[in-house]
Image (cartoon, rainbow, N blue to C red):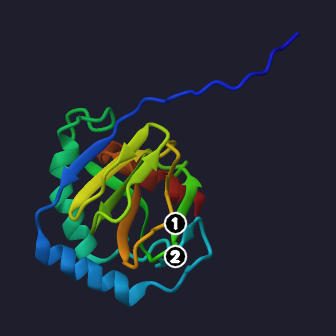
């Protein structure tokens, strides 16, 4: 006979938190978010305003942000990087604005090794299956892609800005292999 039971399980993984002290960059990114939400408003697990999934992927300011963060990620020496230069493959990069009563449903980012978010304020904590994280202006939180997370409804009459990117660590070998595989598919 098989017994079925519910048991809380906590998965372990890498969680990274960084602080970005670049106010001018934060202001510019916030203006970009304001100008580009609307594509997916209230159509996803984000119950608020949202850009398209890939809006920030080719955005020069976003690339500037990543170039600032890569040395911090590199300190963790992820297996894919070994002795290689730290590189990221961005799956998608989008932003959202939550207003009063807005929230984010419980979800994960399967298909990506990591999911990172840049916060522009401290209006709502990020909740995960591994615990809650305080948010604040300039804080970047990175969690494993499999980790469920959510945001409770906003109680204040404010705008909560978030820029999210889902990514995988890669190195030159992986990039070259993927180029060859892509050529075979054509």
- Can residue 110 be seen here? The reply is yes
- Can residue 85 be seen here? The reply is no
Badge 2 marks a residue whose secondary structure is loop
In terms of image quadrants, where is residue 41? bottom right
At a point 17% along the width and 47% down the height, the residue shown is 72
**Dot 1: few (<14), some (14–19), or many (≥20) neighbours within 10 Å?**
many
- The tally of labels here is 2
Badge 1 marks a residue whose secondary structure is strand
Is 91 or 53 nearer to us in this picture?
53
Is 186 or 85 nearer to us in this picture?
85
User: Is 172 drawn above or below residue 50 in the view shown?
Assistant: above
- According to the image, label 1 marks what residue? 103
Residue ranking furthest to the right: 1
**Dot 2: few (<14), some (14–19), or many (≥20) neighbours within 10 Å?**
many
Quadrant holding the N terminus: top right
- Is the residue under label 1 in contact with that under label 2 (CB below 8 Å)? yes
Q: Name the spot of residue 155 as percent of width and height, x first.
A: 45, 69
Q: Name the spot of residue 90 as percent of width and height, x first.
A: 39, 59
Is 53 or 162 nearer to us in this picture?
162
- Seen in the image, is 158 located left or right of residue 52? left
Label number found at residue 151 = none
* CA separation in Å, label 2 and label 1: 7 Å
- According to the image, label 2 marks what residue? 48
Quadrant holding the C terminus: bottom right
Q: Name the spot of residue 56 as percent of width and height, x first.
A: 37, 74
At a point 28% along the width and 85% down the height, the residue shown is 31
In terms of image quadrants, where is residue 138? bottom left
Residue ranking furthest to the bottom: 35
């Amino acid at each position: 006979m098989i017994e079925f039971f519910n048991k809380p399980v906590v998965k372990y993984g890498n969680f990274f938190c960084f602080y970005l002290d670049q106010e001018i960059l934060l202001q510019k990114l916030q203006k970009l978010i304001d100008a580009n939400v609307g594509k997916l408003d209230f159509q996803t697990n984000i119950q608020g305003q949202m850009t398209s999934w890939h809006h920030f992927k080719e955005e020069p300011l976003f690339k500037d942000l990543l170039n600032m963060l890569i040395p911090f990620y590199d300190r963790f020496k992820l297996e894919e990087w070994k002795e290689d230069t730290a590189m990221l493959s961005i799956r998608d990069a989008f932003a959202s604005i939550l207003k009063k009563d807005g929230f984010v449903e419980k979800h994960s980012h399967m298909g990506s090794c990591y999911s990172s978010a840049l916060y522009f304020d401290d209006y709502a904590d990020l909740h995960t299956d591994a615990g809650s994280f305080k948010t604040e202006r300039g804080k970047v939180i990175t969690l494993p892609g499999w980790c469920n997370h959510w945001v409770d409804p906003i109680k204040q009459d404010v705008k909560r800005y978030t820029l999210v990117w889902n990514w995988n660590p890669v190195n030159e070998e992986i990039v070259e292999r993927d180029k060859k595989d892509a050529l075979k598919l054509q």
